[in-house]
Amino acid sequence: MKRLPVVFCVALCIAASAYGQSLAQSDRERALKHLQTTKQNILDATRGLSEAQWNFKPAPDRWSVAEVVEHIAAAEDMLFGLITERVMKAPPRPEG
C-alpha cells in the first residue's frame, strides 16, 4: 500500500498547478487518468480478500488493509475538497 504517497503527491501537484495557472486539457486528462488507474490498482489489489485478510493487523501498532483503504478514501475526499473549494476558486497569483 505504498500508493498513498503517490496519490497524495499527484493531488498536490495538480493543486499547485491549478493555483498557479490553468491546466491544459491534456494535463488535466492525464492527471485524471492517473487517478483512475491508481484507484483501479487498489481495487484490483484488494479484490478477493477474505474478511480475515481485510482486517488482519501484523502488529497492534500497524494498520490493516481495511484501515489503509479507508484512510486513502478519506484523504482523497479531503484533497478533492481542498482543490475544488480553495484552489480552483482562489484568485490568480500576481505576476512576479
Image (cartoon, grey):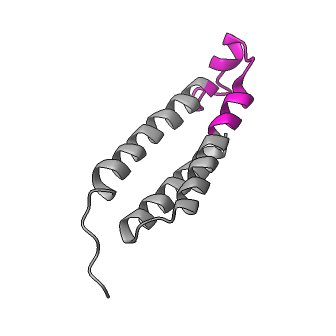
Q: Position of residue 9 (x, y in %)?
A: 54, 57
Q: Position of residue 38 (x, y in %)?
A: 65, 42
Q: Is residue 89 above or below residue 33?
A: below
Along the line of sight, the residue nearer the viewer: 74 or 29: 29
Question: Residue drawn 35% across and 44% down?
Answer: 81
Q: How many marks?
A: 0
Q: Which residue ends up furthest to the top in the rendered image?
A: 51
Question: Residue drawn 34% across and 49% down?
Answer: 84
Question: Residue drawn 40% across and 71% down?
Answer: 21
For residue 30, which quarter of the picture?
bottom right
Q: Is residue 92 above or below residue 89?
A: below
Residue 46 in magenta? yes
Q: Which image quarter holds the N terminus?
A: top right
Q: Position of residue 3 (x, y in %)?
A: 64, 45
Question: Residue drawn 47% across and 64% down?
Answer: 23
Q: Is residue 14 above or below residue 68?
A: below
Q: Which image quarter holds the C terminus?
A: bottom left
Judge left or right: residue 74 versus residue 68: left
Q: Which residue ends up furthest to the bottom in the rendered image?
A: 96
Judge left or right: residue 26 versus residue 2: left
Residue 1 in magenta? no
Magenta residue span = 39-65
Judge left or right: residue 64 versus residue 48: left
Along the line of sight, the residue nearer the viewer: 58 or 66: 66
For residue 22, which quarter of the picture?
bottom left
Q: Position of residue 73 (x, y in %)?
A: 50, 33
Q: Which residue ends up furthest to the front in the rendered image?
A: 25
